[in-house]
Image: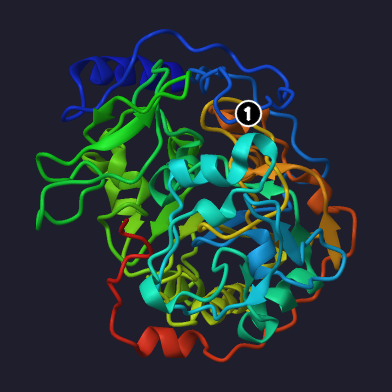
Amino acid sequence: MIRVFLAAAALLALAGCGGGGGGGGSAPTPGPTPTPAPSATATPSPSPTPSARPTPTPIPSQLGKIAHVVVIFQENRSTDDLFHGLPGADIATSGVNSQGQVITLAPLALNIDWDLDHSHTAFTSMYDGGKMDGADKIHVTCGNNCPPNPQFAYVPQSQVQPYFELAEQYTFGDRMFQTNQGPSYPAHQYIFGGTSIPSVGSNLLVSENPTGPPNGGENAGCDAPQGALVTTIDPNGNQNTRIYPCFEHPTLSDLADAKNVTWKYYANSLAGIWVGPNSIQHIRFGPDWNNAITPETAILTDISSGKLPQISWVIPSGLNSDHPGSNNGGGPSWVASVVNAIGSSQYWKNTAIFITWDDWGGFYDHVPPPVYNSYELGFRVPLIVVSPYARPAYVSHVQHEFGSILKFTEEAFNLGSLGYTDARADDLSDCFNFNQAPLTFKTIQSRLHAADFLRRPDDKTPPDTE
């Protein structure tokens, strides 16, 4: 069935996608995870062309014990920024800037009203060939109101206590790297489809957020106005090609469809850079578009009414996203409300919840990522694994990426592999013990609760518009 889809996808790619597409050449089949290259512009092996692959060997005892996977995808925080002081985790309290000065990380509120650059250019500045000393070169939008060294910051634990409670009860990953070296738009392609290629066989990767004509509306996805374009990066690190932001390749949802596994993508809007399915042509203009659900709070009513799908992506509103410049501090309560809804429901006994953040947001992080090619991997982002089978009070020091979540899901439902970043990624097996007595759920304390989010007017503020 996947072979049939790929043949159709190739024909669609040849026809174009409103200007989408990309360079030619057949990409190689991935081997074992490569040794990190010395710089962010090393010649890559492009994301491999997907093919019909054997089903991965599931984690022992996993099949039959996990019937639901929920991916909660928050916004723009590095591991050093959001989990300052977490016991057992590799968290820095200071960093080095481009002048060789040691800068102590300072407390900074979760709901600041300004933002930091988190483009691919910002990545290369901070990475600095692996020296990790260029965070001070990242542009910030706080104008004359900037605190000293705004990139070197952490959120006080008191403002994100539900996250700490989750991390300390279940599994926290301190070697989770965002797959892409850039912002939210390509990150959402990776978490949904394992890649940001525009078409099957392309050697380009979508690398930035799209732009478009003034007052043209949302510039992302297959609904974007004429004139919307997104930058791509080639294997040599050149960002010279811009294309229409509508792509054509298989995603995890296609593997799910082939095995009759149900899925939904919950978001506060069905347009914008954070709605992964909207940028995949056959999904946006096919029957699977019915699985894109708004508002995002519908997951709470689906849980309470016994309608939770087998695979869920949960995308926040801007106010509850943790994104600098657009959040109101409600993110930790929002995440806790989803986890508590599952924990107090029939679904707790067989669900795996993955909470992670789409990019580092421009904040300092001290761990250099393993760089495989001109755009993969990016900086660390936090990971929390919540399940009755998650290892309790455990910090994973094993390397993970967004593709790890996809691989776990593929194994849980016997889906086979997309053959993109999921093929090289680990399967998060160290985060679980399927032979342990299932953990009893304990309510996560938070300032706001599910009822608060359900009775509020729908918030259409996007997590990220840059």
Question: How crowded is the residue under tag 1: few (<14 C-alpha within 10 Å), some, or many (20+)?
Answer: some
The picture places residue 265, in percent across and down from the top left corner, at 41, 55
* Camera sees residue 388: no
Relative height, residue 37 to residue 144 (above, below): above
Quadrant of the rendering where the C terminus is positioned: bottom left
Residue on which the image places disc 1: 39
Relative height, residue 130 to residue 122 (above, below): above
| Occupied quadrant, residue 113 | bottom left
In this view of the protein, which residue sits in the foreground, 101 or 150? 101
Relative height, residue 306 to residue 192 (above, below): below
Q: Secondary structure at mark 1?
A: loop
* Camera sees residue 223: yes
In this view of the protein, which residue sits in the foreground, 78 or 62? 78
In this view of the protein, which residue sits in the foreground, 35 or 70? 35
- Image side of residue 47 versus residue 369, left or right: left
Q: How many marks?
A: 1
- Report the residue at 68% width, 37% height from top: 130
Quadrant of the rendering where the N terminus is positioned: top left
